[in-house]
Amino acid sequence: LHQGLGNEFTPQLRGAWTKVYAIVSKTMIDAANEAEVDAVLAPEAKAASVRFRGAAGDGKLTASGLGASGVSGSFLSPVAEESQDLSPKDIRLIQESWAKVRAIGGDSGHPVVKDIFYKHLHGDPSIARLFEGVDMSSQATKLWNMLSIAVRGLNNLETIVPLLEESGIRHLKYGV
């Protein structure tokens, strides 16, 4: 984002994107953790464990986590909760900045995702190994499209939560 936006990537914009990252990663991780529990526990044990996951008892981000002024942090860890409120202004900043990044990345996202993000990410050999044999052009386009859907869905989180949860569960197969 910084490379694509340059000086427009202000501390306020960085903060807004950090909040979105926290929401997205928390939703994906919670879904992956729940899937692992589901795979291990017998149905009767699972029913008892559900009481301990999530504020709503199901470990999922729901509409009850949304407030009139934006997205409440109630689905985040208690430590992160206050600092992670996503305001309407944050959403506007993210969507406006994403439009600029999309103009650079085009339909496939390759100039941004493949040529910048994955190049940087693959600098870590332990991460690069996870992508051995993967068609990186296809992978970059998939990530680009998922990011676009997520950014568009920030005004209505209930629409993107199932997609994020599915993605979190899929990442279990990849060992991440």
Image (tube, rainbow, N blue to C red):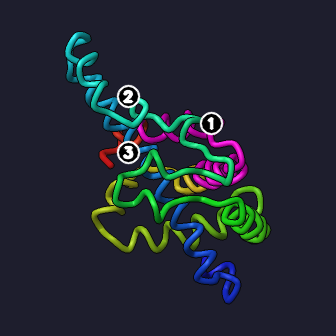
Judging by the rendered image, the residue that carries numbered circle 3 is 29
- Look at 34% across and 62% down and name the residue there: 127
Residue placed most toward the observer, 77 or 169: 77
Q: Position of residue 47 (x, y in %)?
A: 28, 16
In three-dimensional space, the C-alpha distance between marks 1 and 2, rounded to whole angstroms, equals 17 Å
Instruction: Classify 166 as above or below 23.
Output: above
Number of labelled discs?
Answer: 3
Residue span colored magenta:
141-169
Three-letter code, disc 2: Gly
Residue placed most toward the observer, 90 or 135: 90
Three-letter code, disc 3: Ile
Q: Nearer the viewer, mark 3 or mark 2?
A: 2
Report crowding for label 3: few under 14, some 14 to 19, many 20 or more residues within 10 A (C-alpha).
Answer: many
In three-dimensional space, the C-alpha distance between marks 3 and 2, rounded to whole angstroms, equals 16 Å
Q: Position of residue 144 (x, y in %)?
A: 64, 55
Mark 3 or 2, nearer chain start: 3
Three-letter code, disc 1: Glu
Mark 1 or 3, nearer chain start: 3
Magenta residues, dominant SS class = helix
Judging by the rendered image, the residue that carries numbered circle 2 is 57
In three-dimensional space, the C-alpha distance between marks 1 and 3, rounded to whole angstroms, equals 17 Å
Q: Is residue 157 magenta?
A: yes
Name the quarter where the N terminus is drawn: bottom right
Tag 3 near tag 2, CB within 8 Å: no
Q: Nearer the viewer, mark 1 or mark 2?
A: 2
Q: Position of residue 49 (x, y in %)?
A: 24, 24
Judging by the rendered image, the residue that carries numbered circle 1 is 158
SS type, badge 3: helix
- Look at 38% across and 45% down and name the residue there: 29
